[in-house]
Image (cartoon, rainbow, N blue to C red):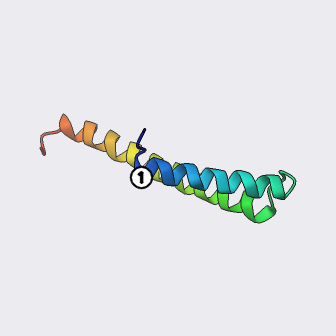
Amino acid sequence: METLNPIAAEALKETKVRDTAAKAGGGQPTAADISQLTFAKLRDLRVHAQELRNRFARLLNRGSSLE
């Protein structure tokens, strides 16, 4: 018997629920679904951009006399 990681199993359940909901709704996302996805992706991009800025600043500071 194969055991699954509980986190992976939970993610699989969530995917199945979303797939079932998409099939029940004709496969077309609602405006609310698109809005949530858009804002989530925008937030993720902002976080990633901030991480890149921080990394770049650390690289610049590495060569300065302050460190």
> Could you say where residue 24 lies in the image, as x and y percent from the top left?
83, 57
Q: Indicate left or right for 40 with 55 as reference.
A: right
Q: Indicate left or right for 65 with 14 as reference.
A: left
Q: In the rendered image, which quarter contains the C terminus?
A: top left
Residue located at (42% from left, 52% from top): 6
Label total for image: 1
- Most extreme residue toward the top is 63
> Could you say where residue 19 lies in the image, as x and y percent from the top left?
71, 51
Between 36 and 42, the residue placed more toward the observer is 36
Q: Amino acid at mark 1?
A: Pro
Which secondary structure lies at badge 1?
helix
Q: Indicate left or right for 13 with 51 as reference.
A: right
Between 35 and 67, the residue placed more toward the observer is 35
Q: Residues within 10 Å of mark 1 (few under 14, many from 20)?
A: few
- Most extreme residue toward the bottom is 32
> Could you say where residue 16 lies in the image, as x and y percent from the top left?
65, 51
- Most extreme residue toward the front is 1
Q: Quadrant of residue 38?
A: bottom right
Residue located at (46% from left, 53% from top): 47
> Could you say where residue 48 lies in the image, as x and y percent from the top left?
46, 47
Residue located at (32% from left, 42% from top): 55
Q: In the rendered image, which quarter contains the N terminus?
A: top left
Q: What residue is shown with label 1?
A: 6
